[in-house]
């Protein structure tokens, strides 16, 4: 649509008017949003480039209604069963995800889909127009290159989010990738899908540029070198390049400095929503912040639209046998995050909980705990065995959560006698507990484990019987409006 000719210029506190129409082909030629300037000629110096970059960052945030975020982050957890439709919600799309039979005409997932392409288009306009800004108009001699690198890291993130929800991300030989956009859209022309391999190549190219030129750290709500490395490690894990993923994740763990480290306790990452200190945790590699009074975050959607699944709440008390030990999945990471909204709806305390003064929240794109677990899995898969380093990485996350090392039963670290197959499953279980209800990563693990190891997803989510429907359909109305140039996913 022609609205994508505009770069959104943020004026105060990242205020942004989003144009995430539910009909991507709808003609909006005459509509020019507030706080926006025509893209051509809008970027003339460092100041306007920084404003345009703020507009790209704002694409990950959400107004109180419409636009597809934060459904993007919550819907995969509905697919996994970690979350479900709230009793207050009548949204049929959420119910279709809960039943693992997504609606091909659902508008909610279409909103998330178009929202990411909106962000990508803002990034593309910035990358094109920044050539008009002299390097000496930026705050430092390296800042122009940093702006470009931050923008590419954001574009890579959006492309990855699109691929893993609407493309067969688990199969590098698949033709069902997504439409990769690296140039600004000048019309409503529709382009065919790229392959999965082509999609990954574009994502990695952007991340390599970000690794080279992104700042070490401005703030945790801006992309940085460490985030680019960590995200690339995740991408390589998805691609099956386990040695590459392990090497890069280990680099993050060993060489990122004191600003990037596990928080001393799990709970302190999330529970204090009263001050902006939430945005400064060493645990966070990159997150999107919500400011007080804006209604921009996930906390505005949990309880009214989404609730925690009963199976997830009870999961931590489960256990399994490793050698002679009976090891509990969790101690209190799950239970410490559960609250009852309105006295009866299970809600997560990872985001604001509508209590007085609980105004600050963050969407977590990558945390250090996930990097530890990426390394543990990738190293084991690369070697076909459990190294002491991989075991230490897994157990480091458990120790931070309060596990003991007595060698008995209960919430213990995993012993050196753990088998390879048990270890691979232990990493999945640990990510399920650590990240559940937070980023949907537990669902993408289920999908990957199914296609890599033959894991039976129905043992976790009984309704997930059709592997074709482990990814979402591209909105069928959208496909038809586009002249069927974009091919629908199988079985939809």
Image (tube, grey):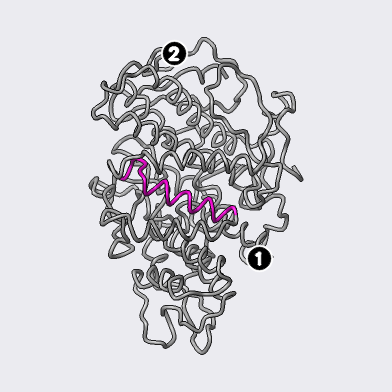
The secondary structure type at the circle numbered 2 is: loop
Q: Is residue 401 left or right of residue 189?
A: left
Which disc number belongs to residue 104? Answer: none
Q: Position of residue 54 (x, y in %)?
A: 35, 30
Q: Is residue 452 left or right of residue 162?
A: right
Q: Quadrant of the N terminus?
A: top right
Q: Which residue is depicted at the point 39% across and 68% down?
A: 397
| Residue drawn at x 51%, y 50% as measured from the top left | 86
| Left or right side of 490 for 248 | left
From the top left corner, tell me how far across and down residue 261 is, in percent: 31, 59
The one nearer the camera, 459 or 260, is: 260
> Which quadrant: the C terminus?
top right
Toward the right, the furthest residue is 491
Q: Is residue 398 above or below residue 438?
A: below
The residue to which callout 1 is attached is 453
Mark sitting earlier along the chain (1/2): 2
Pick the residue in front: 335 or 418. 418
The kind of secondary structure element at disc 1 is helix
Q: Position of residue 346 (x, y in %)?
A: 45, 57
In the displayed orientation, state which residue is furthest to the top: 30
Residue occupying image coordinates x 56% and y 31%: 114
User: Which residue is under mark 2?
Assistant: 40
Taking the image as shown, residue 60 lies to the left or right of residue 265, namely: right
- Residue 423 vs 164, above or below: the answer is below
Q: Is residue 84 magenta?
A: no
The segment highlighted magenta reads 220-239
Image quadrant where residue 409 sits? bottom left
Query: Circle 1: is it few (<14), some (14-19), or many (20+) Cα within 10 Å?
Result: few
Q: Is residue 234 magenta?
A: yes
Determine which quarter of the picture holds residue 394.
bottom left
Q: In whole angstroms, how far apart are the C-alphas of marks 1 and 2?
A: 50 Å
Q: How many marks?
A: 2
């Amino acid at each position: 649509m022609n609205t994508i000719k505009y770069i959104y210029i943020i004026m105060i506190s990242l205020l942004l008017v989003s144009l995430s129409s539910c009909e991507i082909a709808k003609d909006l030629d005459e509509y020019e949003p507030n706080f926006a300037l025509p893209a051509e000629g809008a970027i003339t110096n460092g100041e306007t480039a920084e404003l345009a970059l703020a507009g790209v960052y704002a694409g990950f945030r959400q107004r109180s209604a419409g636009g597809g975020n934060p459904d993007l982050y919550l819907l995969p957890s509905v697919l996994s069963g970690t979350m479900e439709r709230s009793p207050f919600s009548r949204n049929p799309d959420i119910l279709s995800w809960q039943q693992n039979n997504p609606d091909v005409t659902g508008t909610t997932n279409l909103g998330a889909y178009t929202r990411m392409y909106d962000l990508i288009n803002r990034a593309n306009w910035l990358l094109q127009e920044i050539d008009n800004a002299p390097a000496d108009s930026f705050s430092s001699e390296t800042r122009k290159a940093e702006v470009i690198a931050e923008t590419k890291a954001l574009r890579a993130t959006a492309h990855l989010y699109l691929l893993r929800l609407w493309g067969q991300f688990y199969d590098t030989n698949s033709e069902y990738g997504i439409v990769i956009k690296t140039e600004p859209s000048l019309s409503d022309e529709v382009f065919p899908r790229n392959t999965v391999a082509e999609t990954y190549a574009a994502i990695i190219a952007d991340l390599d540029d970000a690794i080279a030129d992104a700042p070490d750290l401005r703030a945790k709500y801006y992309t940085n070198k460490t985030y680019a490395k960590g995200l690339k490690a995740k991408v390589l894990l998805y691609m099956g390049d386990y040695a590459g993923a392990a090497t890069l994740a280990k680099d993050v763990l060993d060489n990122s400095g004191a600003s990037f480290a596990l928080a001393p306790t799990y709970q302190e990452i999330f529970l204090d929503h009263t001050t902006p200190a939430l945005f400064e945790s060493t645990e966070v590699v990159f997150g999107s912040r919500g400011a007080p009074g804006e209604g921009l975050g996930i906390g505005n959607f949990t309880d009214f639209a989404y609730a925690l699944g009963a199976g997830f709440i009870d999961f931590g008390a489960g256990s399994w046998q490793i050698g002679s030990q009976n090891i509990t999945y969790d101690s209190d990471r799950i239970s410490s995050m559960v609250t009852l909204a309105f006295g009866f709806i299970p809600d997560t305390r990872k985001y604001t909980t509508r209590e007085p003064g609980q105004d600050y929240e963050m969407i977590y794109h990558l945390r250090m705990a996930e990097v530890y677990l990426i390394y543990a899995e990738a190293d084991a898969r690369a070697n076909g065995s459990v190294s002491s380093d991989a075991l230490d990485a897994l157990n480091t996350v458990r120790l931070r959560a309060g596990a003991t090392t007595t060698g008995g039963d209960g919430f213990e670290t995993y012993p050196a006698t753990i088998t390879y197959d048990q270890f691979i499953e232990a990493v999945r279980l640990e990510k399920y507990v650590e990240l559940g209800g937070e980023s949907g990563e537990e669902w993408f693990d289920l999908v990957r484990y199914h296609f890599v190891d033959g894991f039976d997803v129905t043992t976790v989510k009984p309704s997930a019987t059709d592997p074709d429907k482990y990814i979402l359909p591209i909105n069928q109305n959208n496909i038809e409006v586009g002249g069927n140039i974009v091919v629908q996913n199988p079985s939809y």
